[in-house]
Amino acid sequence: MLQTPILQFEQVSKRFGATAAVDGVSIDIAPGEFFALLGPSGCGKTTLMRMAAGFERPDEGRVLIDGADATDTPPHRRPVNMMFQSYALFPHMSVADNIAFGLKAAGSSRDAIAARVSEMVRLAQLQGLEKRKPHQLSGGQKQRTALARALARGTKLLLLDEPLGALDRKLREETQFELMDIQKRLGAAFVVVTHDQDEAMSMADRIAVMRAGKIEQIGAPADIYERPRSRYVAEFIGEVNLFEGKATRRGDVLRIEAQDGEIEAPSREGLVDGATLACAVRPERIRFAAADASGANRLAGVVHDVAYRGDHRVFRVRLKSGALARVAAPSALPAPQPGEAATLAFDADACVVLDA
Amino acid sequence: MTTARFPRVATLVFGFAFLYAPIALLVIYSFNASKLVTVWAGFSTRWYASLFSNTALIASAKISLQVAAISAIIATFNGTLAAFALERFGAFRTRSVFVGAIYAPLVIPEVILGLSLLLIFVALGVDRGFWTIVAGHATFTMCFAAVVIRARLAGMDRSLEEAAMDLGAGPVMTFARVVLPQLAPALVSAWMLAFILSLDDLVIASFTSGPGSTTLPMRIYSQVRLGVTPEINAMSSLLLAAVGLALLISAIASRKRDS
């Protein structure tokens, strides 16, 4: 028997006027899970989160929290807390009063509140800032105050709306690890809304990639990266090269007649012979081969430019069709210079076959 | 542009002189020793002293202040309710009608407002006096209060209320602990504005007052018809000072709100 999910969306839909912000979404989120809702702005991820918090009521479907139907439960009666994108710190209250707000609302005793607030202050490393007002805090301090306030009530489910969106790059990475650390220590389920794929990939146990109100794919980060189920997911997560062409099936092997050369990819069930398919290859799965190498998965081109990224370099190679392919190669390996001819090679199993 | 300097300064001086010279004159002559308003006979504060022994004038001032304070409280309360309805109830069907109805009294001639108030008090058989003035003032100053409070409400971050609810605060606690403190400076401004408007209203008070409830502007106006006395100047100067102080407090409150 599986654990009861801490949060469930059951065929949830929400319309704003003529557009469906969320369209028949079902997700189960396990207790203690770090879950990311990933997608571009306007894909419905925030609406979905607001339905979990109780700020939006789904037009159809149900929202269950810890197994209980919460669809019609008002926000203040839900065992859920949310960290807002703007932080929404109460400007007229000190850091300590902000953190204490939820505890006061719950009617905790004065001593219990004081103890819990100082515990949260320590957890969020806000020592010495307790008496400050929000406008006297830096961006990072505001973020940590908002987090401490959302965690203070100790709910088993925390919703975080673009938690790192307002931070600068360096702080963002640091805070990513802090969030993961805090989540592990508390054992609460975190649901993060983000448009930043790196953020989702590095923090989450599972990611739901959303597009136009629907779920495109749910899975572990590696799953989504290595085995995207659609072109949209492949292109949204990381860099990808796509080679399109007519496909023919030869036993276990699928041959795709792409403009830039013949590509061999592993076949799978349900592929129609003669259909136009796309083969997706990640840049780091492509290498430079000797010029005289022939056969499938060998594509000739000319190096267009190179971007140095420290540990690796990203090459853009102009292929026969005129398309630019991306190749990521470790900096230590020998590689052609811009303007030189190059032959790209990759293994059949580096290909993910997708509908074109 | 040094060539444009002179006309610019002249315009400025003339503009301010146009606005404030009569008022300055009134204040200066309130310190005149002479009983003749137009003849300067040296500095004196005797009219301020005699003012405080003019019981009728003092009584009227008291009535005016009471009317202003009470009607401003009512106006602020009602204005808050109206502002919430307009700002927070979404785009309900009669919203634009309601917006128009709230803002119309800002431009309706006071005489018409006063007359209609008089008619309704007569129709209802209400004895006119202190409370009818309060009601009349609360009616028209409420619109100004609603404008001020609505502007503040529109600028308020909705996510603060959501955050409060999310943290387990019900509607009452959310309002008392989060919305009200945010709104407080606007409430002070609205009250001040309503207070000042009530304090210097003559027209509506004239229509809605009854025996024994003569407000200060009414008293001044009726005395001036018999001739301007320096006492009136002194009273007016004090009134100016009171209004100026109220404006100052209102300005400080709104500056605090913006920071």
Image (cartoon, coloured by chain):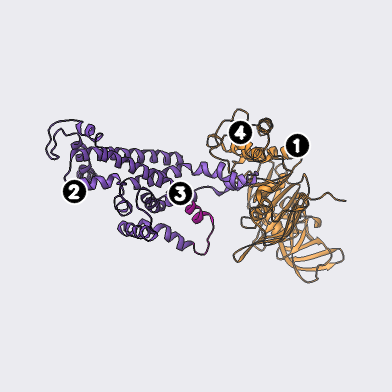
Chain colours: A orange, B purple
The chain letter for the residue carrying disc 4 is A
The chain letter for the residue carrying disc 1 is A
Drawn side of residue B76 relative to residue A199, left or right:
left
Q: Residues within 10 Å of mark 2 (few under 14, many from 20)?
A: few
Identified by mark 4, the residue type is Ala
Report whether mark 4 lies on the same chain as mark 3: no
Image quadrant assignment for residue B186: top left
Q: Residues within 10 Å of mark 3 (few under 14, many from 20)?
A: many
- In this orientation, does residue B88 appear? yes
Query: Of helix, strand and loop, which one carries label 4?
Result: helix
Marks 2 and 1: which is nearer the front?
2
Quote the CA–CA distance across marks 2 and 4. 63 Å
Query: Of helix, strand and loop, which one carries label 1?
Result: helix
Identified by mark 1, the residue type is Arg
Which residue bears the numbered disc 2?
A: B225
Which residue bears the numbered disc 1?
A: A185
Residue found farthest to the bottom: A274
Q: Earlier in the sequence, mark 1 or mark 4?
A: 4
Which residue bears the numbered disc 3?
A: B149
Q: Position of residue A40 (x, y in %)?
A: 63, 55
The chain letter for the residue carrying disc 2 is B
Q: Is the residue under label 2 in contact with that under label 3 (CB below 8 Å)?
A: no
Q: Position of residue A68 (x, y in %)?
A: 76, 52
Q: Is the residue under label 3 in contact with that under label 1 (CB below 8 Å)?
A: no
Viewer-proximal residue, B44 or B182? B44
Identified by mark 2, the residue type is Arg
Marks 2 and 4: which is nearer the front?
2
Residue range (magenta): B81-94
